[in-house]
Amino acid sequence: MPNDFGKLRIAIALSGLVVATLSTSCGDGTNVDGVDAGPAALSDALGADGAPAAGGNVTTLEFLGVETGIFGMSEYLKFSLPENAVSFTISAVGEESFLYSLGEVIDPNAVKLVEFSQDPSLCVSCKNRVAGAEEAAAFLFPITPTVGLVGGEYSFIVTSYFLQQGMMQAKPSKVDVRVHILTSTPGSGTAKPQSGVVDLNFHFTGAGGITAANAAENEKLKLAIADMREIYKQVNLEIGTLRYRDVSEDFKAVESISGKGNELAQLFKLGAGNEGGVNVFLVTSISDPQAGGAMAIIYGISGGIPGPTLLPGTAGTGVAVVADVTLGFDGNFGAVMAHEVGHHLGLFHSSEAPWIGIHDPLPDTGENDTSNLMFYAGDAYIQGTDQANKLTGDQGFVMLNNPVVHLHP
Ligand SMILES: [Zn+2]
């Protein structure tokens, strides 16, 4: 058993598979492209899903009830990373209306993987890019092949900010912090994952007439899943088990995506108790009164980049996708799902809008490549899979690092 972690408790050490859920949101405040936003939650990482053929193991370390103090900063939290770690994910689940991020993350060689950022919602200059999120946030390491993990002791600081009328200020909070460490199977060394399987937990609000009872036969959903499979095949990521659940029709139209009591967070919390997989919520519309006006058409949103995939039922665990063709677009429902699930697993937009000038941290994604699945603009990924929706090797690297993905041995 790992020792001397102070407050750290070993919650689980499971082998054979990983249970997790995710949520992603475009954490960079550039949601006007109509593609993202959201919170949700899921499960107990305890391996209840018994998925076969997992090639990785996940260990969860918990630091519960961490206080961030008057400057909105925790003390240094420490953990030991084994030599055969493939990735680790830090999650922070706290209070409504608080935004959580990481102040610093320092590796055993004193390299700062994360440094304090002016913008806690997104640190573009950080060696390992991190995006803060409201109420429930998650941070994946490595988020790019240019970051290498080494075994040994890591130290990090969790930060908290209070969001009031769009203004963020450091404020003390209490937050549950977890570190999920994904390790390779003994004997396989630290070779990066080559392929994996992700399960999807669908939640139906009645949007598109799809319900748990008819989902397996619904042509629209079947086509969307087939498209997703085709897109993810590029990076050797399979779609595994599909699970269906009906949820309240009250959330058919999601009318708020941030702030206290927002509907997106409430919707994502309905994913509590799910088995491991990405929670997908189908809705009729998603709107953001904060954004106002015509720019606020949103086709899909993720509870985080990545989302807290192994924690079903949080405000950030899930993606919401519009299933009805009522917003003037008749594009590829499956590609929108693939884009949002991509965020939830840890993919940033390959490129934001030209006037923003931000690109993802991956070496092999071309700048302003409109054919990439993760290009910011909806018109790229709502095309047919034969026209766009490209994923690169580095994007696959990120997706397979997410602990919700079952790795092939
Ligand atoms: Zn997006």
Image (tube, rainbow, N blue to C red):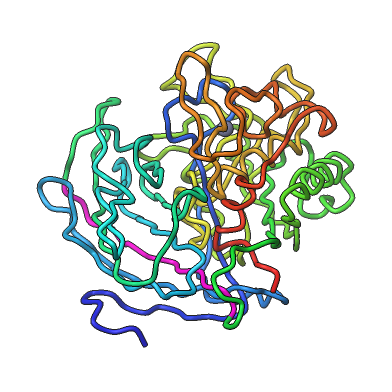
In the rendered image, residue 102, in percent from the top left (x then y), is placed at 30, 49
223 left or right of 204 in image: right
State the image quarter where residue 350 is shown. Answer: top right
User: Looking at the magenta stretch, what is its main secondary structure?
Assistant: strand
Residue 290 versus residue 20: which sits nearer the camera?
20
Q: Where residue 368 appears, x then y in whole percent?
A: 60, 22
Q: Which residue is at the front of the view, 288 or 226?
A: 226
Is residue 45 in the magenta section?
A: no
How many marks can you see? Answer: 0
Residue with the most extreme left position: 70
Which residue shows up at 55% across the image and 39% down it? 363
- Left/right placement of residue 109 relative to residue 388 reads left
* Up-down relation of residue 340 to residue 137 (above or below): above
Magenta highlight on residue 183? yes
Residue at 59 percent across and 29 percent down: it is 35
Where's residue 209, x and y in %?
79, 39
Quarter of the image where the N terminus is located: bottom left
Q: Left or right: 197 with respect to 160? A: right
**52 or 106: which is nearer to us?**
106
* Residue lying at 10% horizontally and 47% vertically, measured from the top left: 70
Which range of residues does the magenta coloring cover? 172-185
x, y percent for residue 305: 49, 44
Ligand 1 picture quarter:
top right
Residue 343 picture quarter: top right
Relative to residue 320, is residue 177 depicted above or below? below
* Nearer to us in this view, 248 or 260: 260
Quadrant housing residue 165? top left
Where the C terminus falls, by quadrant? bottom right
